[in-house]
Image (cartoon, rainbow, N blue to C red):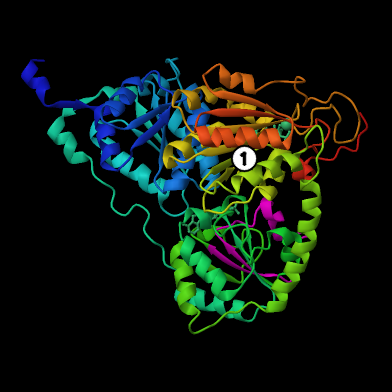
Amino acid sequence: MSTDQTQNLTDGMHIIVDALKKNGIDTIYGVVGIPVTDMARHAQAEGIRYIGFRHEQSAGNAAAISGYLTQKPGICLTVSAPGFLNGMVALANATTNGFPMIQISGSSDRAIIDLQQGDYEELDQMNTAKPFVKASYRVNKPEDLGIALARAIRASISGRPGGVYLDLTTEVLAAVMDKDEADKTIFTVEDPAPRQLPAPESVDKALKLLAAAKRPLIILGKGAAYAQADESIRQFIETTGIPYLPMSMAKGLLPDDHPQSAAAARSHALSNADVVVLMGARLNWLLDHGKGKHWSTETQFIQLDIEPTEIDSNRPIAAPIVGDIYSSIEALLAGLKSTPVKSPNDWMAGIDDIKKVNSEKMAAKLNTDTSPLNYFNALRAIRDVLVDHKDVYVVNEGANTLDNGRNIIDMYKPRQRLDCGTWGVMGIGMGYAVGAAVTSGKPVVAIEGDSAFGFSGMEIETICRYKLPVTILIFNNGGIYRGDGVNLHGDSDPCPTVFMKGARYDKMIEAFGGIGYNATTPDEIQQALKAGLTSGQPTLINVVIDPAVGTESGHIGNLNPKSVVKN
Ligand SMILES: Cc1ncc(Cn2c(C)c(CCOP(=O)(O)OP(=O)(O)O)sc2=O)c(N)n1
Ligand SMILES: Nc1ncnc2c1ncn2[C@@H]1O[C@H](COP(=O)(O)OP(=O)(O)O)[C@@H](O)[C@H]1O
Ligand SMILES: [Mg+2]
């Protein structure tokens, strides 16, 4: 091919990068290799920030959480087969949680794969992905790359957000076409997540039910947080005076010290409410499916959700409002003029009484001074530092570390608590920390169980390499749930969840130029955490926790199968 003929040519890997740029994608998280390395190089050369990870699952988690924070799909780039599969855990978790994310993976030769002739990293990735994503597309022609990306963007953020898989074959990445012709095939997606307004009659019905309620309760879910309708939600809650419960990632939508928060009286509020409004929250296992001891069979439900099939998932919903949260809340606010709603004062007063009793009980646990530390006094030490750093993003995973962290670490701003979410998955920690730090530019504090940290711990090198302002506190109790070898039956046999004694995780980060601390007292935790926040340097604090104080599976031990057969 003569020089002038190559003058105006482009190829698949350049076209997809141009399409990403045209749609405002400014960051790609990934692990490169055959056949996507040159695509990443080109993206970087074109000004897209490429963040290189040590494992695709963490790259995917970073992409997913950046989608949750920005309402634009986070992009994860992987190689074929094993790299694709490593990313799939994060992609499936994104779909489960409703986080918009696109995983782009290279794939091997279609003809060889389809005849199962044994290609390098042979796998039918498009079909493998289908059960775990909102949509799964494969591109075979360079002129289709623009429309394929557009479809992936729209599928990931319209309706209930989620994961989308985009398969780029080796052939299409190398396929050549005329540049001018290629430019005609890429475009900016128009209104990829259109507002979905609720039916006026559904809003009226909900307001009439609320107006008659004696003990109304609002449950805020991460769907409400994702919607970025913060001011409208606050206005509705404060205008009606209805008490509310934030689910873990909705903490901070209103500050946790807000007078209408019922969090410290959760069981009382759930079991006594007569009308419950689910706002971007599923009535799933995290809410005991709306059944059992925390719920009354008399409770009536109002549900605000963008996904129509979520309605009636577990309990009949008396007043469904299907639409995007912002449009639905705005419609409810407008409806208050004709149907005023005011939560009875005695209901909130009763909740306040319970809050007072429970807060005193919790304070007694928090203000102990034990050696070694336990979860309560360690978390109280962290809480009392973070109250002066309300911009910090908090990442939290583990069992006891997560369950106690959720109740003790107060949040004051929306979308700043990032945790194991709907699946209760371990391993989100370092990926979420990188994604939050890169996306927001703000400091991140990751509060990690020692087992949970182990799933993504190698990414501390990634954190140090990009010099991200991340401080990691590892609650080192020497094991999964506990470190003393006592199992949930109270038998002192070395159960299969114990790690080595005296591990010093703080030494790990020093290998990559980060700053490590070992903390055995609340004061040492606070000094180290303040130093990490002040320096903005990657910091790891090994918090030594009493190995005997955890409970197996934290607060969800009841989900374990009960064996009736003696060993
Ligand atoms: C991917 C994955 N693997 C395993 C588990 C099971 N699991 C595991 C392994 C947990 C770790 C608990 O230990 P930790 O050290 O992180 O926290 P605590 O010791 O403070 O409870 S919590 C939990 O549900 C999981 N949820 N997700
Ligand atoms: N913009 C939005 N408007 C309305 N509903 C939304 C929006 N984004 C997500 N959702 C819904 O919010 C719900 C989130 O529920 P869930 O993940 O269970 O929250 P949580 O775990 O915090 O209770 C999902 O059913 C999802 O369809
Ligand atoms: Mg542990």
**What residue is shown with label 1?**
396
Comparing 210 with 437, the one in front is 437
Residue 17: x %, y % from top left: 28, 32
Residue for point 52% across, 27% down: 86
Crowd around label 1: few <14 · some 14–19 · many ≥20 (10 Å): many
The correct choice, above or below, for 227 with respect to 537 in the image is below
Comparing 141 with 479, the one in front is 479
> Toward which corner of the image does residue 497 lie, by quadrant?
top right
Can residue 100 be seen here? The reply is: no
Asked if the magenta segment contains residue 296, the reply would be: yes
The quadrant of the image that shows the C terminus is top right
The correct choice, above or below, for 26 with respect to 45 in the image is below
Can residue 519 be seen here? The reply is: yes
Most extreme residue toward the left, as rendered?
4
Residue 564: x %, y % from top left: 90, 38
Q: Is mark 1 within 8 Å of ligand 1?
A: no
Residue type at the position of mark 1: Asn
Looking at the rendered structure, the number of numbered marks drawn on it comes to: 1
Range covered by the magenta-colored residues: 276-304
Left-right relation of 466 to 561: left
